Image (cartoon, grey):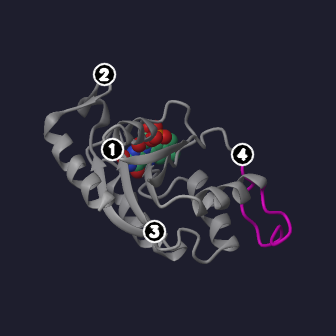
Amino acid sequence: MKKILAFAGSNSSQSINRELVNYTTSLLTDVEVTKLDISKWIVPIYSLDMDPDETPELISELIELISKHDGFILSSPEHNGGTPAFLKNIFDWLSRRSKNVFDGKPMLLMSTSPGQGGGTTNRKVLEHMLPYLGANISATYSLPSFYQNMEDGKLKAEFLEDLKQAVSRFVK
Ligand SMILES: Cc1cc2nc3c(=O)[nH]c(=O)nc-3n(C[C@H](O)[C@H](O)[C@H](O)COP(=O)(O)O)c2cc1C
């Protein structure tokens, strides 16, 4: 059975992107899902001065975890039209340890926010950035106006169809 690693790129304990990830994994069948919560991670800001001897343990563990999975679901918040520093820092560390950390394996890249854009601006930034780390972005999905469209843990029908299509492109 294929193994999927699912996580949100947020350090908020109340992350709406994590909610979206959890909802999305509930749509998957016939795969083994590992849900990773990185919200409490404290990772020092990458510096060339720390490199190469001081790789944070969490980064080494994440590389190991990524290598053991066949595909990835990531939902990222958007901060000021870009990637939150918390997540970007993790990607910077990963990229310094491996040029191809995601190894060409498929990724469903998602985003959501309370606003109408649903984090799409940053999702496009990540679509450009993550192939530098070897990701194969095989499907994308953004949910606008999270609090209006995800009610009591249920996605409104008009958004569910697009999400199901994205999931189906990903699992193929
Ligand atoms: C510093 C900062 C910048 C933000 N910039 C944006 C933005 O550019 N676009 C947007 O849609 N939401 C923006 N937001 C709101 C986030 O979408 C919102 O906090 C959301 O809950 C973050 O996702 P999370 O809950 O998964 O961490 C920003 C929030 C913060 C704290």
Indicate the position of residue 13 as horizontal and vertical percent values. 56, 31
- The residue under label 4 is 42
- The residue under label 2 is 152
The span from disc 2 to disc 3 (Cα, nearest Å) is 33 Å
Tell me if mark 1 has few (under 14), some (14-19) or many (20+) residues whose alpha carbon lies within 10 angstroms of its own. few
Q: Which residues are magenta?
A: 42-56
Is there CB contact under 8 Å for labels 3 and 1? no
- Please tell me how many numbered marks the rendered image carries: 4
**Marks 2 and 3, the one that precedes in the sequence:** 3
* Type of amino acid under label 3: Lys
At mark 2, the secondary structure is: loop
The span from disc 1 to disc 2 (Cα, nearest Å) is 22 Å
- The residue under label 1 is 29
Magenta-colored segment: predominant secondary structure: loop
The span from disc 3 to disc 1 (Cα, nearest Å) is 19 Å
Q: Which mark is residue 43?
A: none
- The residue under label 3 is 105
Which quadrant does ligand 1 occupy? top left
Q: Is residue 51 magenta?
A: yes
Which image quadrant for residue 121?
Answer: bottom left
